[in-house]
C-alpha cells in the first residue's frame, strides 16, 4: 500500500520539529551525553507536547471551538496546553543543574526565567501558526465554494439558452418537413444527456466535449442548410486530455447567434486544434446587416464564456477579440495541463 505524499511530508515535518532541541544543542548528535542532558530532555518533551498541541489545535480546537465562537472553552483548552508545554517537562525531569554545569557553560544560561520565556515563545508560535494555517484553509475552501457556485450559475444560464436555440432549429426543420428532423431530435437528446449528466464535474474528457461541439455544429448546419457557409476544422490528439465542460460553446454559439441571417448567405469559420498541452479555438463570423444592431448589444454569451475561463483557467488562458465593422473574431488559447 502506497503512503500518500501528504502523510510523508507530515512525518518528515514532525521528525524535524522534534529534532530541534538536539540540532540546536552545543554538540548536535545522538550521543548519550546530549540525550541524557536534562535540558535537552525537557526540550524534547516540550516540543513533543507542542506537536500534539499543533494537531489538536488545527483539527479540533480551532474548527470546533474558535470558529464556533466557544471562546471560554477555547481559552480553557489553550491554558491546559500552555501548562503542559511549560511545566510538564520540569515535573517529569528532575536533575541537579550543577551536575551539568560543564555541559551548559557552552550555551546560554538555563535559568527558570530563560526556560519560561522559551517555552512561552514555543507555545505562542505553535498557536499562531495553527491559527494562520487553519484560517487560510478556511478562506481557500470558501473561495472554492464560491467558484463552484458561480460556475453552477453560469452553466445554468448556458443550458436553457442552448436548448431554446436548438428547439427553434428543430422547429424550423419540422415546419419545412425536413428529412433531417428525426436525426436532429436524436442528436439533441444525446447532447442534453451529456449537458445534464456529465457537466456537473469540474472537468470532463476532451473527447466528450468535442463530440458535444461537433453535434452542436451539425445541428446548426441542418437548420441553416445552404443559407450559411460553415467551415469547421479540427486537428490534434484528444485522448487522455480533460477540459472544463461547456467552456468553449458560448464563443461558438455566439457566431451562430449573431452571424447568421436565413435570408442571405452567411459565413462562419471554426477552427479547433490541440497540441500536447494547449487547445486553440478560432471563431470567425461575418456580421450580417440584419443583425448589425444585435451585434452592438451582444455580450451575454461572450461574457459568460469569459467568466468561466477566468474561474477555471486563471493565468492559464488567453483570449483575443476582434470586433470589426463587417466581421467578428474570437481567438482563445487554453493550457490543459
Image (spheres, rainbow, N blue to C red):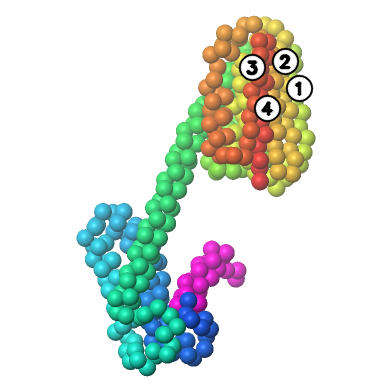
Work out whether residue 321 or residue 251 is closer to the camera in this orientation and state it. 321
Q: Answer above or below: position of 169 versus 3.
A: above
Which residue is identified by label 2? Answer: 267
Alpha carbon of mark 3 to alpha carbon of mark 1: how far?
20 Å
Of circles 4 and 1, the one toward us is 4
Which of the two labelled residues, at mark 2 and mark 3, occupies the earlier sequence position? 2
- Disc 2 or disc 3, which is closer to the eye? 3
Residue designated by label 4:
331
At numbered mark 4, what does the secondary structure look like: helix, strand or loop?
strand
Q: Quadrant of residue 179?
A: top right
Residue shown at 71% from the left, 43% from the top: 277
Q: Cβ–Cβ below 8 Å for labels 1 and 2?
A: yes
Nearest to N terminus: mark 1 or mark 2 = 1
**Residue 239, percent from left and from top:** 72, 45
Observer-side mark, 3 or 1, equals 3
Most prominent secondary structure in the magenta stretch? helix
Q: Which residues are magenta?
A: 1-23
Q: Badge 1 is on which residue?
A: 231
Amino acid at each position: 500500500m502506497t503512503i500518500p505524499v501528504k502523510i510523508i511530508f507530515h512525518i518528515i515535518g514532525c521528525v524535524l520539529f522534534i529534532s530541534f532541541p538536539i540540532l540546536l544543542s552545543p554538540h548536535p548528535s545522538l550521543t548519550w551525553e546530549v540525550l541524557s542532558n536534562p535540558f535537552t530532555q525537557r526540550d524534547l518533551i516540550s516540543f513533543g507536547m507542542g506537536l500534539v498541541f499543533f494537531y489538536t489545535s488545527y483539527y479540533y480546537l480551532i474548527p470546533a471551538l474558535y470558529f464556533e465562537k466557544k471562546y471560554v472553552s477555547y481559552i480553557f483548552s489553550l491554558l491546559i496546553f500552555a501548562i503542559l508545554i511549560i511545566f510538564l517537562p520540569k515535573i517529569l525531569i528532575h536533575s541537579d543543574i550543577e551536575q551539568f554545569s560543564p555541559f551548559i557553560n557552552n550555551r546560554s544560561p538555563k535559568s527558570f526565567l530563560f526556560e519560561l520565556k522559551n517555552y512561552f515563545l514555543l507555545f505562542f508560535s505553535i498557536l499562531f501558526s495553527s491559527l494562520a494555517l487553519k484560517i487560510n484553509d478556511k478562506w481557500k475552501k470558501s473561495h472554492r465554494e464560491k467558484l463552484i457556485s458561480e460556475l453552477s450559475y453560469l452553466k445554468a444560464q448556458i443550458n436553457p439558452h442552448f436548448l431554446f436555440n436548438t428547439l427553434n432549429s428543430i422547429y424550423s426543420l419540422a415546419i419545412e418537413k425536413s428529412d433531417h428532423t428525426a436525426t436532429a431530435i436524436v442528436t439533441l437528446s444525446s447532447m442534453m444527456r451529456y449537458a445534464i449528466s456529465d457537466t456537473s464535474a469540474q472537468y470532463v474528457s476532451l473527447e466528450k466535449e468535442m463530440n458535444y461541439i461537433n453535434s452542436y455544429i451539425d445541428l446548426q448546419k441542418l437548420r441553416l442548410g445552404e443559407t450559411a457557409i460553415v467551415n469547421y476544422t479540427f486537428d490534434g490528439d484528444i485522448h487522455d486530455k480533460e477540459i472544463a465542460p461547456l467552456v468553449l460553446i458560448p464563443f461558438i454559439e455566439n457566431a451562430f447567434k449573431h452571424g447568421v441571417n436565413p435570408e442571405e448567405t452567411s459565413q462562419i469559420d471554426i477552427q479547433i486544434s490541440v497540441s500536447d498541452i494547449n487547445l486553440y479555438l478560432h471563431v470567425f463570423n461575418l456580421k450580417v446587416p440584419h443583425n448589425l444592431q444585435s451585434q452592438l448589444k451582444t455580450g451575454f454569451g461572450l461574457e459568460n464564456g469569459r467568466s468561466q475561463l477566468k474561474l477555471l483557467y486563471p493565468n492559464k488562458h488567453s483570449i483575443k477579440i476582434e470586433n470589426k465593422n463587417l466581421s467578428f473574431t474570437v481567438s482563445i488559447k487554453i493550457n490543459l495541463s
